[in-house]
């Protein structure tokens, strides 16, 4: 152990100096120096105070985020203002998940997988999982292939479905909620578009692979 | 076992706690990154340049040129891209209609670079099919903006 540690330290000291390391140090030195405070124009991008920005001011008609905030401070308050909606959305999703609502969806899905995607019914569990979590979906897809339940070609079609709009439901409801208050269509509509495009892409990939990689059929 | 014991209140609270973790550990840092990038692009004047250069292309979808920064960020991270979207909204560079057009595109072609590993790599997809999957995903982002630019006219 001790020897290993010493080796690591030796490597650290000897380690080659990359250009990126030198540049990042120089940039950090400029940013934290305060030399450019009060600078105008492009050079103010390297000033810590400029990047930090200002909190908005609370006036009548604004929330605690305030108006006319700039930079990172404005972003921080904006992000804080989003926390309640993310918690609410994830709370509702959790109830659906734990009461078995998703199992119903999975059962409904099984018979239509073959006509809609050309995929066997046994991918329905992985398909539902992939709408919630990118990593869970991909992991289960590997298992399906390893167990011989889907072919190499079916794996690509299924992966295509997962790839575009990955983890669609959870990602859209959590990340998307940042701008839900601002969009002009019902909040479900963009999600419908995302899922429809996933199905479209899977089928296009199915056609393309059948046409250009016939040896895999 | 654990599932059987949970009542609806536990379920909701567990999900809400998960929501807190997502918001604080994943959204907030992404928003900070996005606002830093936007600020740099704005004060250096690069944002204006991007706006001018990309105006013809983004105009096809009813969007100003600056909107492309959202699409570019989306290739790296969905959270970052929605952060940029929120930033451009709050600075008035995008209006509500334009944000509506952009939102589904962020997801339809979002996180492409990391998903090569997370989806294609993990699932073990045949590498000769990678090109098809990547092209279809980028196309999906473009289609999402086209569909939304039409749909948003009805609201």
Image (cartoon, rainbow, N blue to C red):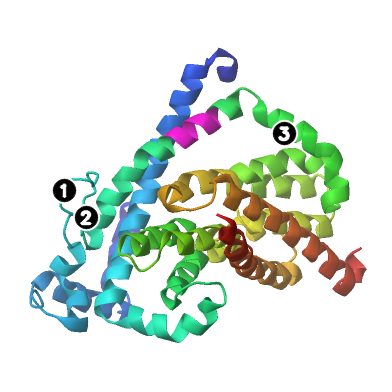
Q: Which residue is mark 3?
A: A105
Count the marks: 3
Residue B127 higher or lower than A101, as above or below: below
Which is more toward the observer, B63 or B105? B63
**Inter-mark Cα distance, 3 to 1:** 47 Å
**Label 1's element?**
loop
Q: Which residue is mark 1?
A: A59
Residue A110 x, y percent position in the rendering: 82, 38
> Which chain hosts label 2?
A
Image quadrant where one finds the C terminus of chain A: bottom right
Q: Which residue is mark 2?
A: A67
Residue A39 higher or lower than A152, as above or below: below
Identify the image quadrant of residue B1: top right
Sequence-earlier tag: 1 or 2? 1
Residue drawn at the location 34% of the way across and 78% of the way down: B47
Q: Main secondary structure of the magenta part?
A: helix
**Inter-mark Cα distance, 1 to 2:** 8 Å
Residue A156 x, y percent position in the rendering: 76, 59
Residue A55 x, y percent position in the rendering: 17, 55
Q: Which residues are magenta?
A: A88-94
**Label 2's element?**
loop
Q: Is residue B134 visible?
A: yes
Sequence-earlier tag: 3 or 1? 1
Which is more toward the observer, A138 or A127? A127
Q: Look at the numbered discs 1 and 2 and tell me whether their residues touch, using CB distance below 8 Å.
A: yes
Residue drawn at the location 53% of the way across and 48% of the way down: A172
> Which chain hosts label 1?
A
Local crowd at mark 3 within 10 Å, few (<14), some, or many (≥20)?
few
> Which chain hosts label 3?
A
């Amino acid at each position: 152990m001790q020897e290993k540690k010493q080796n690591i330290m030796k490597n650290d000291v000897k380690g080659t100096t990359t250009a990126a390391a030198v540049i990042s140090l120089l940039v950090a030195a400029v940013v934290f120096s305060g030399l450019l405070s009060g600078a105008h124009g492009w050079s103010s991008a390297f000033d810590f105070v400029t990047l930090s920005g200002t909190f908005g001011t609370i006036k009548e008609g604004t929330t605690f985020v305030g108006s006319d905030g700039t930079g990172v401070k404005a972003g921080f308050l904006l992000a804080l203002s989003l926390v309640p909606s993310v918690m609410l959305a994830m709370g509702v999703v959790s109830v659906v998940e734990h009461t078995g609502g998703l199992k119903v969806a999975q059962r409904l899905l099984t018979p239509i997988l073959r006509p809609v995607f050309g995929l066997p019914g046994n991918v329905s569990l992985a398909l539902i999982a992939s709408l919630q979590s990118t990593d869970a979906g991909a992991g289960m897809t590997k298992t399906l292939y390893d167990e011989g339940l889907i072919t190499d070609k079916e794996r690509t079609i299924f992966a295509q479905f997962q790839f575009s709009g990955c983890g669609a439901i959870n990602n859209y409801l959590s990340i998307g909620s940042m701008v839900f208050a601002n969009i002009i269509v019902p909040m479900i509509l963009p999600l419908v578009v995302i899922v429809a495009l996933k199905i479209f892409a899977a089928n296009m990939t199915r056609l393309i692979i059948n046409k250009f990689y016939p040896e895999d059929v | 076992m654990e599932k059987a014991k949970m009542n609806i209140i536990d379920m909701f609270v567990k999900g809400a706690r998960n929501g807190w973790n997502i918001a604080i550990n994943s959204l907030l840092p992404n928003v900070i990154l996005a606002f830093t990038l936007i600020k740099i692009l704005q004060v250096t004047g690069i944002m204006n340049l991007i706006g001018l250069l990309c105006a013809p292309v983004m105009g096809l979808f009813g969007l100003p040129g600056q909107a492309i920064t959202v699409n570019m960020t989306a290739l790296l991270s969905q959270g970052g891209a929605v952060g940029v979207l929120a930033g451009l909204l709050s600075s008035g560079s995008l209006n509500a209609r334009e944000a509506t057009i952009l939102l589904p595109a962020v997801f339809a072609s979002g996180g492409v670079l990391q998903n090569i590993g997370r989806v294609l790599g993990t699932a073990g997809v045949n590498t000769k099919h990678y090109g098809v999957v990547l092209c279809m995903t980028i196309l999906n982002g473009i289609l999402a903006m086209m569909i939304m630019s039409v749909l948003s006219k009805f609201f």
